[in-house]
Amino acid sequence: MNIKANTRTLKIVAACAAAFLAQAAHAVTDAELEEAFFPYKKGFPTAPGLKAGMVINKSNVDQFKDIIIPGHFKLIKDGWMEIPVAATFDMPLPKPYIEATKQHADKVKLGTTIEGFVSGRPFPQQPSASDPRAGEKLAWNFKYGLNWGDGAIIYPFYWRYINANTGAIERTMKFEFHFLNFMHRIVNDPKPNITPNPSQLYRGTYVKVHEPLDLKNTQLLIQAYEDDLKRSDAYLYLGFQRRVRRLATGQTTDSFLGSDLMIEDFEGYNGRVSDYKWKFIETKNALMPYYKHNEMKKFHPDFKEADGYKFIGFTGKANCTPDITWQLRKVHVLEGRPVDAGHPISKRLIYLDAQIMTPSMSTIYDRKGEIWKSFQIGKAHPDFHLSINKDSGIPLDDSGSVIDLQSNHCTAITFRGEIDPAKNPATIFQVQNLRGGD
Amino acid sequence: MYKHKRNNNFRSYATKYTTKFATIVSLGLAAVTLTPQAFGQESLPALGEGSSPWKVDVFYENATYFRGKDNTGNSVGLSKFRNTLQAEADKDLSNGWAFHGIFRGTYDGVYQLNKDEYGRNAGGAVALESSALAGTPGHYLPFGQGVVNWATAQGIGLPPSNAFGFNSTIPGGQVNPSTSPAAVANLPYNPNQGLRVLFDRWGNNPGGVQVAVPVRPCDVDNRGCTDFGGYGDKKRSELESPEFNSKLDFIREFYVKKNFNLDDGKQVFVKLGKQQVVWGRTDLFRVLDVINPVDYSRNNIYDELQDIRIPMWILQAEYRMGASDTFQDRNVSVVWNFDQFRPNNLGQCGTPNSILDAACILRAFKSLWDNGGTIANFASALPPGTPGNGPHLSTDFGPHTIGIRNVELPDWSFKNTQLGIKWEGVTAGGFSFSLNGLTYRSQLPSLHMFNVGALNPFTGAIVNTSDLIAFDLVYPRVSLIGGSADFQIPDANLAVRLEAALTHGEEFGNSAQASGYSKNRVFRSVIGLDRPTIIPWINEAEATLFSAQLFYQHIFDHELYDRPFGKVGMVDWENNFTGTLLIRASLLNARLNPQVVLARDFKAHAFAVAPSVSYRYSDNLSFNVGANFKFLDDDKRLHFADQRDSGSFAPFGAYTDANGNTQTGPGAWGLSGLVPLGAFRAGPIGAAWREDEIQFSMKYKF
């Protein structure tokens, strides 16, 4: 028995040593950077039978099952939506982000949590199935991904709650969203960090509701800590209470204001890396909702702006899916399972765009392991959008939907995003700012 | 002799509850930090010059409520048919200023649709008890026919100058038969019409004091009507549409605001105008949230606070310092309430909502002072010197003997304005807290026995005494220091909210004091716990919120003494706890929300449960169906010294105890009953326990 025990111990030590070696930082080569940030330099991906200009629908979707995330495959199969295919295009990230990656990635490693990260993409190397922490590294990559850059505003930001059985629009929300990176900033001053920042906040998200009346002036502030083991703080200002209310963090996995999204779902995934056990599945090509906003043919008929900006419209069953084109892109397939047994979901399957490192496509499984929701965030090329976004290099969240396949309900969202530091001062992300509300 | 001494305990209960049942240093700091350039570049706003259009939302709401039987067995029926039209307007002005306004008009049809209960036909004739005559036809005699009156008083040896008796029979007035030159010469008409017996809607007080109170709108019956501070003297149309008054209450909010950005990244935030300023972090209870008074007449404690706070003209200035090396957020704010003082609106007797039945107590005692009246079971039937504390006889008091003489409302003056300061921050660890200080005026009335120049009803002479059952109503100055905090306990998925305050200057009714009141320091605190919980059998996607709170109040230097017939001192409990629990589920994407609110007043042994279901049909149309049930264990435990035995005019009316000791001067011996102080022990829940209600409301946004 002692011999058996010692043998087991040795095996564990050996495995740990191997794992440690796998996590140790090493210098990033130009080839690795090239593959990470310019995956289409050698050509755009192809798939058998797939051509730009075609439409994938329930009659031909079986042919493309391997390039469509399971949730959306089911949606197409069930007639919820179709996918108009367009040509793939490159969306190179800002040079400062790539330079920061080159400069700092060799110092980054994984211990209990991430160590040595300064800015850029923490783990630019291609994920490997032989790396037991490859999934975790991908999760860090999107946590510290470019996202909205150092800061951005989305306003107006329309959400519609739709009963897909009847097509009835239950609610129309008009939001204002702001994002700000307190740390690891790459473009806007101050860089790399806003100081003082004694709490070591990494990122702030500020939300204000403008419509409808019953929720008007509701504000939400989420402060995510740099320490991934520390839960985010969240504060809610309720207009009807005229005061700020501290939220229990569990409310980040509650339906957000009745929508089909949880706070945890924001931007594809908005929780802590440590909230999930991550597993890298594979790298492959898949259809992603990426497009050039200004080249879309139809826009939303109800939402209009004085300057002529047009919002992405919706189509398909009950108008639940954005009326956009899709393209074949290189993705990393990532599986996350919540650590908390009481979490409302059992698993989320994420298609992480290899170039942008954004979880644009997710299939969410309920506690029984059955497909519950399918989530997409459409990315718009910044050079084909509002002029203020041109040359920012930041792919823009521009449209999206969360479809609850079990209750036949959806939340359809359409954005007006602006990369404008002037509209995003750090003072917005202070708790006291909420108290100035109406 | 009977003495109702104290309504002062309004404050302890109404301060602790709210709805739904819920300095100079800073100025100087801001001034130092603000550079002249900062203000020089920022001129005052100009309405209409902003680039943004007006944003106006208008909605209509109907609230229709029904009540069942009250304690008399009377079916109340319709208790609210309130129609509200509200407009909310916003506009970005020039130079970074923004305007926000809320305008509200209400029409409550209950005063015409249920006029027998709340309108021109409310109340009726009442009879008042003489326990000494139990079993005889004289046991209950009509108001105005008290056993002890001017004539019968002479029968027991009092002089013709005695001031007992009043005019219940002759419209237009009657010459006072009293020969006392100090007594009122012309007795006003005070008929046995449009009356109810105090507390009869929710309690019984056999053998105890009973007082008749007029209940019709003041344009129909102005007895007991006076301005207690913006309430208490309303005619029907003013009750129907309370916002349209001299205070322009239809303007709920009207303010401009702006952030001044300073060169160092800090800000000064200014909000000026008619507004609500909310301090604190708890629901339902008002510990720090005391800057704006509250209108309890709208729906007792059961409306959202935002709808019943009385907005005041206030200047708020916040110096927002942002993060430092030790705090993630820091700010100091000054609140200057420069509006003329307004107290809480406690309602008007005869309307559906009279928190703690205070409006009825006030109206009854104001009418007693102005007109006189019959009080049940007041004069002892025992011959002088006979040991014992009963039985009693109903007694007709003349005007200017018992009741509320004057209401002293503070005029506007600089020193009568109210000033608060708050330091608020978030520590590096995410602990959010505030420290608060406020000098203000009590929003609840205090009754001071004036004692000097009292009319002795036995002789008709003017005397100085103490423990007099006649008062002036005042609103004392109060100072408050306190704080609040919130934090989360991630492992338990809990948000914790804390709030505490210590006040100086609050006044409480105190029958152990010759003046009938005492100033006591009061500590109040609330701990609240919020836990959103996914309960799969309710909803797997949307959490059910559990929100529990425990309120605690301690009165320092509390006085309560044993006397021959019971206890005297402060009717308020020295220590009291109230607990609340809200369970709110969310279904159909938060469009269907069943909830239940439970509340327990531990000392009063009162309990309330309020289930409701709200359904949002669309963004513009929503419905709510609810109910409100209250329970009270036993009103005997609410009995407290009613001061029939206060001995203000001893040897007249002096009692003798079992040992043969006779009162020789003022000072109550503890003769007790439910009236008039039991309501304060019952609290807002217990005093309304026979106001069970079914509620329906509909809201439509245009």
Image (spheres, coloured by chain):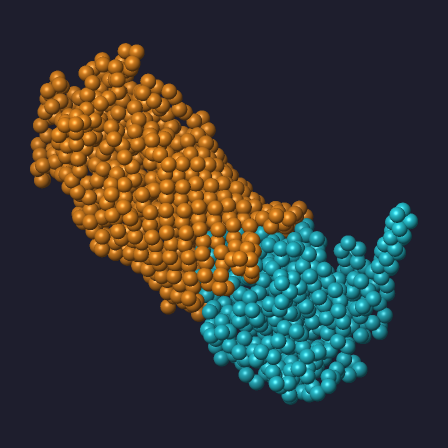
Chain colours: A cyan, B orange
Residue for point 69% across, 71% down: A351
Q: Position of residue A305 (x, y in %)?
A: 51, 76
| In-front residue for pair B686/B367 | B686
Query: Can residue B222 be seen in the rendering of this structure?
Result: no
In the picture as drawn, the residue positioned furthest to the right comes out as A3
Residue for point 56% across, 56% down: B534
Numbered circles on residues, count: 0
Q: Position of residue A75 (x, y in %)?
A: 60, 76
| In-front residue for pair B573/B129 | B129
Residue for point 17% across, 32% down: B140
Q: Position of residue B215 (x, y in %)?
A: 22, 43
Q: Is residue A263 above or below residue B216?
A: below
| In-front residue for pair B47/B426 | B426
Q: Position of residue B369 (x, y in %)?
A: 21, 33
Q: Quadrant of residue A30?
A: bottom right
Residue for point 58% across, 48% down: B494
Query: Can residue B81 be seen in the rendering of this structure?
Result: yes
**Left or right: where A330 falls relative to B98:** right
Q: Quadrant of residue B1?
A: top left
**Left or right: where A217 falls relative to B494:** left
Q: Is residue B87 above or below residue B581?
A: below
